[in-house]
Image: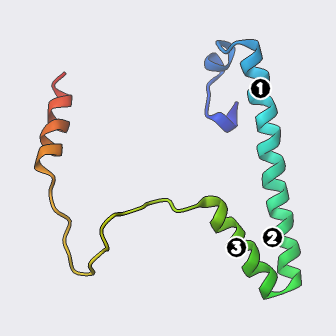
Amino acid sequence: MHNYTMGFREVLSLPVKTFWMLHKNVDRIHAENDQRQILVVLNAFNGGDGLTNLLEQFRKRIGKIVETDEPEEENSAPKLDETGLMQLKGLGSL
């Protein structure tokens, strides 16, 4: 199951219904990728407006990856989170 980065032993340990569900999803993922490639080629031949619209559709599908509550200041340095650092160090001693 290359698409799920699963090893041979992991795949063998899956329940049969789960395996076939994942297999169907692989076909769907490949079909979506093929459709996307065809859209890119078609829009490339149609000119700049089609390609611009296609890229905008892709951006909408991806969505906003990182949301911040505070506006970014250009020259502001990140602040060290001392409490978070101590918690992470504490996890290493478990």
- Eyeballing the image, is 86 above or below 44? above
Nearer the observer, 30 or 63: 63
Quadrant containing the N terminus in the rendered view: top right
Callouts 1 and 3 close, C-beta under 8 Å:
no
10 Å crowding of disc 1: few (<14), some (14-19), many (20+): few
Residue 69 appears at what percent x and percent y? Answer: 33, 64
10 Å crowding of disc 3: few (<14), some (14-19), many (20+): some
Sequence-first tag of 2 and 1: 1
- Eyeballing the image, is 76 above or below 2? below
Q: Helix or strand or loop: what does disc 2 sit on?
A: helix
10 Å crowding of disc 2: few (<14), some (14-19), many (20+): some
Residue identified by numbered label 1 = 21
Residue 80 appears at what percent x and percent y? Answer: 14, 57
Q: Residue at 75% across / 73% down in the picture?
A: 54
Q: Amino acid at mark 2?
A: Val
Residue 46 appears at what percent x and percent y? Answer: 88, 83
Residue identified by numbered label 2 = 40
Q: Amino acid at mark 1?
A: Met
> Which is closer to the viewer, label 3 or label 2?
3
Residue 78 appears at what percent x and percent y? Answer: 20, 65
> Which is closer to the viewer, label 2 or label 1?
1
Extreme residue toward the bottom, this view? 48
Q: How many marks?
A: 3
- Eyeballing the image, is 60 above or below 52? above
Q: Helix or strand or loop: what does disc 1 sit on?
A: helix
Quadrant containing the C terminus in the rendered view: top left
Left or right of 2: which side holds 31? right
Residue identified by numbered label 3 = 55
Q: Which quarter of the picture shows residue 29?
A: top right
